Amino acid sequence: MLLKIFFPQCCKGADSGLLIGRWLPGHNSAVVLAVIHFPFIPGQVKQYLSQLQSLTQVDLTVLGSWCKPSEGQEGVQSFLKDLSTIFPHGRWLQLSNEKGKKCFSCQVNSRDGKVIESGDKEDQGDQVICIHYDQCKVMLSQLHPAQGGILNPKTELSELRLVFQTVSQSQALFYIDKYDEGPFKLTHWQSEGREGSILVELSKQASVPVCLVLAWLLSIWYWVCKSRILNLWPMRFVSSKLYSCIQLSHRAEHLQTISMPRKAEDHTEFMRKANIFVSFLVDMALGLLLISWLYRENRIRRLADTLVPVADHIAEDLQELLKWLMGAPAGLKMNRALDQVLGRFFLYHIHLWISYIHLLSPFIGMILWYVGLSACLGLTFALSVLSDIVALLTFHIYCFYVYGARLYCLKIYGLTSLWRLFRGKKWNVLRQRVDSCSYDPDQLFIGTLLFAILFFLLPTTVLYYLVFTLLRLLVVLFQGLLHLCVDFINSFPLFAMGLRICRSYRLAAGVKFRVLEQEPERPLHLLMEINPLTYSAVLQWYRTLTYSCYPKDSWGVLCKNLFIGELIYPWKHKNIKTD
């Protein structure tokens, strides 16, 4: 039978004593966690192990003895061997570190008196493999499922996962170092002094009152949001369409998540809180940098002075475009009457838009000065405000697109219905299907006239719809880039990526083994090393879920909607249902 012994590298130089660890249930394996140095009192060892079991909920026991040859302790090995009667178990491990050897030897004594030597040639069925591991890395590491799924706690854990779980749950065993005064000394990864950071401990102590104050402020914010005035239909409709309001509510949810005083229950919840917290700090830092750049050298005033001429220039270009469409664009002959009506209609809207811009021009500098302060809430909020400003400044383009799309859609549906009339068909509204129908000559005559009128007016309508749709898509593309930047900052797992770069062993995808020693009469010694997660796997595991700014439908549905004249709303998200 193959016996695996997981031995920590930090215990290789320990003095003689007892091996503390755990026999893995369901597996022929043992995990060594620490070495209790000789001399000791067996009763105190038993009492200490019982206390650790109640704290860690791990079945810790004495696995065997560890012997390191030294002067004046020649009889220690036989004494430690006799302790198997005081600490009864199915098997008793005897590990001996020999001088001049790179690794130690191993002997296993079973309860029935059978002895398994590490290099016994006569019994090849019983073999011992010693697997050396870095105790600090294994304890701090989180082993992820190989298939990328969620670990089900009801399923049976694998041997490797039990090793990681045993070491991580035995942190209370590693609190005693060589500077502590106690009945005995231990060797483990913190034997030379407990590792810690004063800054981390101070931040933990300060986080509790900060979280309480933040939770109180958030409660006031939610109370204001639930007030009757803000729940009226106009306010609710406008807030649902403004991207800055959506981003503000999203950040409020993030702050509510990280301000909970309750400790994270598992590794996934801890990583989610850490990613949100780091993302929030980076977002605030980038926002403050943007403020320092905007308000330096009077850049806000220069931006306000540039905005009105740019709006006038865009309006003039639209007027030139409409005049070009009212003539013979690209040599195409349009319906002159409809062409003139549509052209003058849109020119009048541009005239209204220019008047609106010049009416606001004295206040644009002050508006931009106060809007720039919104960057103190983060770069994402500033980008959201910029998206809303672009939407307001291009509202006339949106109106042109809506007029052209509605007129084009009306003609498409009219031509489709009249085409069914020629074939003796009609659309059954109740059954949502096309049924046969008989028409009299008068209906067919009127249908023929209407079909001819709509068909010959369609090219003029298509030209206006195509031009304004392209302009609208340019605006939507720019807003989509802004939304992608906001979504990237909100969802990118900065903390997890930092762990992957600086301490890759914290996010483990698996392990690999390297041969340390392989001699005929000695056990096989392997070194267990941690394989970190790939960067793509880190993104898949720890990307923060946010509202998506991608298109609601697929590209095929999007092209279909553009072809039939359906309106494209960029603010519709996947979780919003519309009629």
Image (spheres, rainbow, N blue to C red):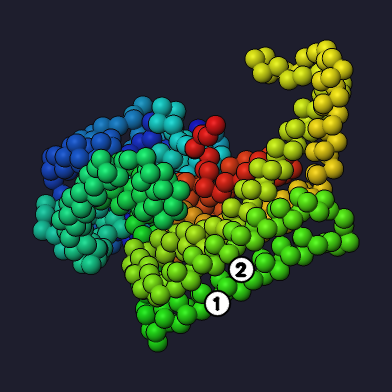
User: Which SS class for mark 2?
Assistant: helix
Q: Residues within 10 Å of mark 2 (few under 14, many from 20)?
A: some
How far apart, in angstroms, are the residues tagged by discs 1 and 2?
10 Å
**For the point 19% across and 57% down, which residue is it?**
210
Q: Name the foreground residue: 374 vs 411.
A: 411
Res. 195 image quadrant: bottom left
Residue 349 seen in this snapshot: yes
Residue 18 seen in this snapshot: no
Q: Would you say 142 lies left or right of 188 here?
A: right
Q: Amino acid at mark 2?
A: Ala
| x, y percent for residue 452 | 86, 36
Q: Would you say 501 lies left or right of 411 here?
A: left
**For the point 52% across and 47% down, which residue is it?**
571
| x, y percent for residue 282 | 39, 65
Q: Would you say 175 lies left or right of 446 here?
A: left
Quarter of the image with the C terminus in it: top right
The numbered mark at residue 315 is: 2
The numbered mark at residue 196 is: none
| x, y percent for residue 319 | 67, 67
The numbered mark at residue 309 is: 1
**For the point 68% across and 58% down, which residue is it?**
344
**For the point 45% across and 69% down, which residue is it?**
359
User: Which SS class for mark 1?
Assistant: helix
Q: Name the foreground residue: 223 vs 227.
A: 227
Res. 354 image quadrant: bottom right
Q: Would you say 56 lies left or right of 136 here?
A: left
Q: Is residue 273 above or below residue 413?
A: below
| x, y percent for residue 157 | 44, 33
